[in-house]
Amino acid sequence: MSQLKSKHILFLFLLSFFFSLNPEVFEAETDKNTERLLVTYETTKSPSRTFEQPSKVDVIEVPETEVEETIDLLISKKEVKHVEKDQPVFLMGGSEPNDPFFTYQKTWINQIHLSKSWNLASTKKSTQTVAVIDSGVDLTHPDLKANIVDGVNLVTPKKPAQDVDGHGTRVTGLIAAETNNNLGIVSPSRGTSIMPIKVTENGKGDLSSVVQGIRYAIDHDADVINLSLGSYNHSYALRTVIEEAAAEDILVVGAAGNDNESSVVYPAAYPDVLAVAAVETGTNEKASFSNYGSLVDLATPGTDIYSTSLNGTYAFDKGTSMAAPIATSSAVLINESAPYLTSKQTIKLMKETADPVNPSYSLGSGLLNVDSAVQGITEYNRIYGNTAIETAVEIAKSNWNKLEEQTLDIEGERISGKFVILARSDEFPDSLAASPLASKLGSPILLTKKTGVSSEVLTELKRLHADHVFVIGGRNAIPEKISNEIKSAGINTLRIGGANRYETATEIASLVNGDNLDQAFVVSGEKFPDALSISSFAARFGAPVLFTKQSTLPKETKTYLNKNVPERAYVIGGKEVVSDASYTSIPSKELERIGGEDRYDTNFKVLLRFGASSTSKKTYFATGLKFPDALTGGAAASLSGDAIVLLHPTRYTEPLEKSVRYLTNQSIKDYRILGGPQAISPEKAWSIDRLLEQ
């Protein structure tokens, strides 16, 4: 064994040993660069080297080269709730910017819910560059000059892009005015680089200059292009350069037009441009002049807009020319909060989080709400709560408006009613076999700790008007006091629990399948990922999930299968999870192993083997490092034959890309992320969104 490999194994052993006893700061070698990790535990830990008093939080320091594997190791421990990397923080300053003319802007700032988003994002100056294709900019304006980068004058090429009309300067102020600098006005971006591209003078310009300006912006690495100009004439050349900009992931924003027409001017009318209409500032009514119609994407305030003007002054203006840069600057802020977003994703967030406006006119998705858009970075298509227990409740709320009446024969007694499954949130073995039962009953799976039922779970049971709760596991797993708490709420309890996890799984199988067993799935009872991969498919086929040990088939599982020999049994997992000896001892007329190189590859191969259901409408994505979210999501997935895709919460894995490619080939693009940002990072979630859109 190499010295490097030996050192690696020793590091993991020591780290595991330290955290099995007491969280302490890992003393990295002094000649290595290190990174700090913040570890949050489920329960309070003893004092560590980091803190003198007991706490649920600790800080550890590890070599940079060991960060990712350390995170994986820590997350896999059931006592660890969350692990995050260290990050910078910034002083927020006062509650309002100190720019003296902020008071003139406050109405529209509040209207698009901007102030809160300033506090959610860092106060660093934006690193993005916005190309303002317009009448130029007042290059010496004190509120703008620090942010102006090299541009071009396409009207008089040998001259600088100096504005003589004022229009471009007013547009630019809304995009990039320095904020909180005791001077002038604020901008949503709080200040970003401006590339002035002058294409008009005295209110007129040529289409050829606009086309050249867009090409200049592309060639000089602009991130965003603002086009507060246009005409009603389509141009193939203009559309082509817009498409070229979009292909480079440049976000293009255009003004819808000021003629009170049910149409949109070009280039805003092109599909790759965010077309912005105007509402009256302080209301949800269309501005009297604003164009409207089906080609509008979004609206922002566009009347009484105070901005920078010529000769270092400031002035009021109105028009969709003013509405568009408000959207542009807000997009910069949103993207600065999440630089991994593509321009299409930023536009999607802005549109899908917009507020309603007066429906008398079509103003796209509605009024821009920056706060909702920034929050949407974390929350978009995500179902989660603060804990796994609360996430299970949110999954139930999202998928069950009500429970259907069901009837079961249990030990010769016929029981009818509305059923819910209750499993442990912090111990997986009993819980993982419950998916087929949940599917048979059309029931959600809710979770509990050993110490008591949460108020959220009790509230959800009442919302669903549940009559019966199946408690999964013996009294050591879920104590009788849990049942008593549920009974106190007027709900009957039924316990399914054997002497061990293997027997509990067979008891569930007997209840679901009786003596008729066409198919069975056998998975590791010692590790959880493969059971999660198969849960929604087992539910679809009405087949039981049974457990085995790595090296031997437990007698409980073997006895059940000998009594009910299936036509086909599937073993999920490779030989390192279920050995050949265990595999070959499974009673079945036909036997098939489905296993990959790791849990994620196995998950993909299961999806490929059984395929998307003809009724599938979406896909659920869950972390492969912990079980609760995928378990409770599996019950929801079974309602419409959807799949559960497991992924690493932060890293790229090839099986995820293969799974998404397969799903998109089946025209399944809708999805939900299960669990909060501590389960699957926002960056990872948006990478899934991007894959599904490709």
Image (tube, helix red, strand yellow):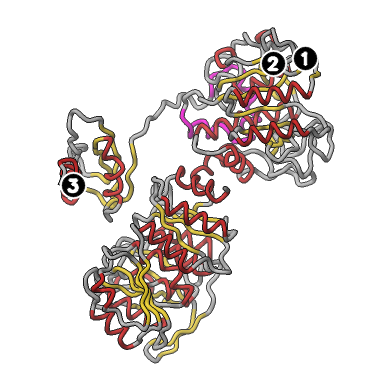
Residues under numbered marks 2 and 1 in contact, where contact means CB atoms less than 8 Å apart = yes
Task: Give the quadrant of residue 158.
Answer: top right
Looking at the image, which is closer to me, 130 or 603?
603
Q: Amino acid at mark 3?
A: Ile
Q: Which residue bears the numbered disc 2? A: 136
The residues tagged by marks 2 and 3 sit, at their Cα atoms, a distance apart of 62 Å
CB of mark 1 within 8 Å of CB of mark 3? no
Q: Which residue is mark 1?
A: 201
Residue identifier under label 3: 9
From the top left corner, tell me how far across and down residue 212 is, in percent. Answer: 70, 22
Disc 2 and disc 3 in contact, CB within 8 angstroms? no
Residue 590 to residue 231: above or below = below
Residue 254: % across, % down: 71, 32
Q: Name the dominant secondary structure of the magenta segment.
A: helix
Numbered range of the magenta stretch: 97-122
- Badge 3 element: helix
Answer with left or right where residue 669 lies relative to residue 236.
Answer: left
Q: Secondary structure at mark 1?
A: strand
Q: CA distance from mark 1 to mark 3?
A: 69 Å
Camera-side residue of 343 and 79: 343
**Residue 640 lies in quadrant:** bottom right
